[in-house]
Amino acid sequence: MLRSLQAEQEQLQGTAQTWARRGAALEAAVGQACAPRELERFSRFMADLERVLGLLLLLGSRLARVRRALARTGAHGDPEEQASLLQRLGLLQRQQEDARELKEHVARRERALREVLVRALPAGELRAYCALLAGKAAVLAQQRSLDERVRLLQDQLEAVRSGLGHQPPSPRLASSPGTRPPDKPPFSPLLI
């Protein structure tokens, strides 16, 4: 199952690269059709959109992990652990609300940018812009989902190995090439 998920990650990385090439081509078209200020606005918007969507997905997965941990501890769990988890849950919920406000701000910027692009770009390139927004968001969500599934499966494998009395397993398998920056760990640090 782990190998299958890693193969999916590699395939998704190819899709992400395709969207990146389309984004570069669209940025070039915007550069030709618009003033330098509008091109800068477009570039900043695309980068900010990716960051905000990534943040929302990350916070959603962390919230899910904290909620699972709370469910595992149950009513009869360690009170200190429950208090710590509840504190993290509250913090993550506040962060998620802040990220939603950021997303609303980015959405307002997108509407303003779209007005500029409607006037400047031909219909085909405008459709490419809309497809790029949807495609990048879908790829980010799929990447986060696959990363979480790989992480969960690796955690389950570690738990099985530990339960069988084996030596601690080797470090987690690295992500597929290109799915993360080389200087970053394969997964974000846990809050739980």
Image: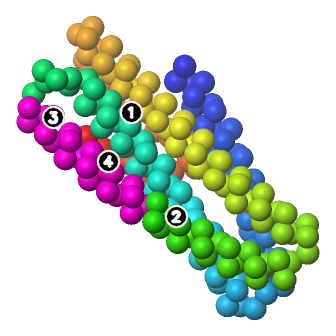
Distance (Cα) linking label 1 and label 4:
13 Å
For label 4, count other residues whose C-alpha is less than 10 Å away and answer few (under 14), some (14-19) or many (20+).
few
Distance (Cα) linking label 3 and label 1:
27 Å
Q: Are marks 4 and 2 in contact (CB under 8 Å)?
A: no
Give coordinates of residue 192: x percent, y percent. 25, 40
What residue is pinned by disc 2? 103
Give the mark nearest the N terminus, 3 or 4.
Answer: 3
Q: Which amino acid does label 1 sit on?
A: Arg
Name the secondary structure under disc 1.
Answer: loop
In the drawing, does residue 38 fall left or right of residue 51?
Answer: right
Q: Marks 1 and 4: which is nearer the front?
A: 4
Which quadrant of the structure image shows residue 30?
A: bottom right
What residue is pinned by disc 3? 82
Distance (Cα) linking label 3 and label 4:
20 Å
Read off the magenta span: 79-99
Q: Residue 12 carries which label?
A: none
Residue 21 visible in the snapshot: no
Q: Looking at the picture, does residue 164 appear above or below residue 16?
A: above
Distance (Cα) linking label 4 and label 2:
23 Å
Distance (Cα) linking label 3 and label 2:
31 Å
Name the secondary structure under disc 2.
Answer: helix
> Residue 162 colored magenta?
no
Q: Which residue is drawn at 32% across and 47% down?
A: 189
Give coordinates of residue 157: x percent, y percent. 38, 19
What residue is pinned by disc 1? 172
Distance (Cα) linking label 1 and label 2:
32 Å
